[in-house]
Image (tube, rainbow, N blue to C red):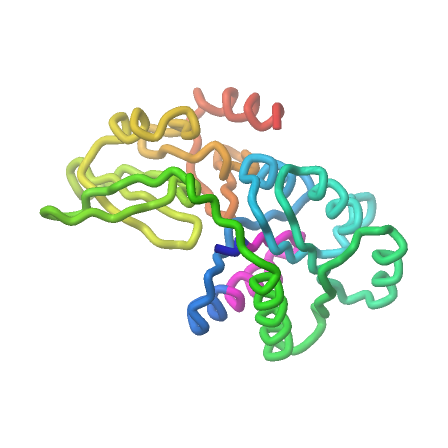
Amino acid sequence: MLKIFLCDDDPFFLSLEHDLISRAIREERLPAVVSGMARSLGEAVTFLENNPDRYLVFLDLDFGKGQPNGIDISAALKRCPSAVHVVFTTNHHELAMDVLKSGAEPFGFLEKGADVERLELDLRRYIQMALSAGDRRDPNQRTLSLAVGCGETVQIAAADILYLEAEKNLSHGITYHTINGSSITIISTLDREAERLGEGFLRVHRSFLAARSQIVALREGYLILSNRTEIPCSIKMRGEVKKWLSQK
């Protein structure tokens, strides 16, 4: 399974990339998933350090004056335990030579100013190229068996879980939310699921349990997860979350 990571300070382009890639994966049934998104160096490094794997990264080159640029971020990502193929996205063609001179060894370049149809074709092309470069899924990856009905179970990889949510309108209903946007509801309690999942998950609110590795930032009382989902964080847990993020 190829994991794709997006990093851009423009929320509109970040959303557009995600939608186009998700459609390509769905229509062509590609063994790939958008595993995370970030809008800064800190968020990107936090995610990739805590989720080591093989990634295709679509990375913006220009993050604004005074901010680390795409070349800086690429260098930082390659120091992470993850293996990355970086495709730089930019409107500034003249910066491509700077990338090559830097020794960043790009997997390719993507023109942000292209029309949507051209952009989608280029995104699909790079995904196919990355898939052709080989996959190395860990056969020992931990999986959970979730009971979703009478005698019916669903297998889910622990590494694919974003967060768990206690349902308000279903007694003892607990919903697992995954990085690919799917959700699975079971009958249980957050306490029971927290015990089963272990230290990799943090009870951040009375109704939410988050995967530590998927937390990239804390802003105004909300956790920002790897796919840009925001979930509430209780006041008493904010100190622990900040401490954990500062250690990454």
From the viewer's side, name the closer residue of 58 and 106. 106
Whether residue 60 sits left or right of residue 248 in the image: it is right
Residue 186 rendering spot, x and y as whole percentages:
21, 42
Give left or right: position of 244 versus 66: left
At a point 85% along the width and 58% down the height, the residue shown is 100
- Between 102 and 54, the one lying in front of the other is 54
The image quadrant where one finds the C terminus is: top right
For image coordinates 56% across by 55% down, the residue present is 4
Residue 8 drawn in magenta: yes
Total marks drawn? 0
- Is residue 103 magenta-colored? no
Magenta residues, start to end: 4-21
The residue lying at 60 percent from left, 36 percent from top is 49
- Residue 141 picture location, percent across and down: 42, 40
Q: Nearer the viewer, residue 189 or 195?
A: 195
Q: Where's residue 72, x and y in %?
A: 79, 45
Check the image and report above or below for 225 versus 89.
Answer: above
Q: Is residue 132 left or right of residue 96?
A: left
Occupied quadrant, residue 195 = top left
Task: Specify the farthest residue to the left.
Answer: 150
Q: Main secondary structure of the magenta part?
A: helix
The answer to whether 168 is drawn above or below residue 11 in the figure is above
Q: Please give the name of the residue rendered at 47% of the width and 32% of the height, measured from the top-left corner.
A: 212
From this view, report whether residue 210 is shown above or below residue 156: above
Q: Position of residue 134 (x, y in %)?
A: 57, 58
Q: Is residue 200 above or below residue 147?
A: above
Viewer-side residue, 136 vs 69: 136
